[in-house]
Image: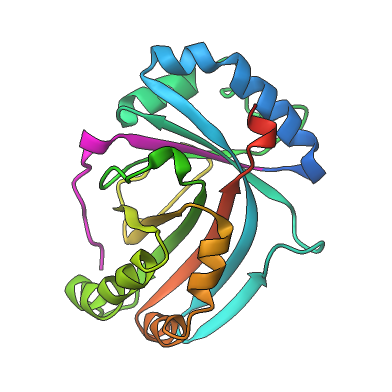
Amino acid sequence: MAHYYTPNEEHGAYLFARFPSRGGTDVAVVSQSCVLNKKSAEIQRGRFLGIARKIYGKYTHGDHATPRYAKVNQYEPEMALIVYLFENQKYARLFFNSDKRFKQPDFPPPSGMCEAWSVCRYYTPDYRDDNRTFMMSEVQLQEGVRQEEYRERYCTPFAQLLLDYDAHPYVVQANTVEDLRRYYLGADTILTVHVFPTPEELWKCIEDDRYIPLKAVHATMASENLSVFTIDPKPCR
């Protein structure tokens, strides 16, 4: 059953581009491109927030949680995430399609396979420049689970837990994702993004005793593909 949301562009839209980092080699190439296209982003009413490295990921299907990688190990491809913020999705799309570097099918060169998408924010977080860690989930409710039930049993108590660790819960909660390249979500998939100041607050949150029963409840109601990215200031200078 699909749950539809109306995009709210009052608080801007993220542009995310995810790519294999190849041990940091591609990060250097992408970082240079982001510096060079700063003016192009500003013309389209956007700004570059940084390049985030993937530090955690887990896939949960129904009642079974299958860790894809815990604090990313050598057996999984290293991933990174470009993060921009635009006034709305239209400007994010115009920027991505007009920038001569990003629009290349093999970006980052010579043989990249980036995925890119934009999504509206639900609200504007406080202290926005201090929030550098993104907890991102692609959620599909199981058959027969109502949105209101999911919100009451999981979203509301989980949001409170996040607030206890100085996080901004549900900055993104939508299925109004605009695919810009190779990023396909079904109409019944909800994308959520929670923002933390640092990875340390996030680790404390997911190690909290209250988190375990919440995840058990979530597993009975939905499938989830969870990823955590944190912006590294070094390649963003």
Task: Assign the N terminus to one quadrant of the image.
Answer: bottom left
**Res. 31 image quadrant:** top right
**Quick check: is 7 in the magenta stretch?**
yes
Residue 179 can be seen in this image: no
**Percent coordinates x, y for residue 185 in the rendering:** 42, 53
Up-down relation of residue 142 to residue 116 (above or below) = below
Magenta region: which residues?
1-19
Q: Residue at x 48, y 71 (%)?
A: 205
**Percent coordinates x, y for residue 101 in the rendering:** 62, 19
**Quick check: is 210 in the magenta stretch?**
no
Residue 34 can be seen in this image: yes
Residue 96 located left or right of residue 7: right
**Res. 193 image quadrant:** bottom left
Q: Residue at x 36, y 72 (%)?
A: 161
Q: Residue at x 38, y 56 (%)?
A: 191
Q: Residue at x 32, y 26 (%)?
A: 90
Residue 15 located left or right of residue 91: right
Task: Assign the C terminus to one quadrant of the image.
Answer: top right
Up-down relation of residue 225 to residue 193 (above or below) = below
Up-down relation of residue 188 to residue 16 (above or below) = below
Colour basis: rainbow
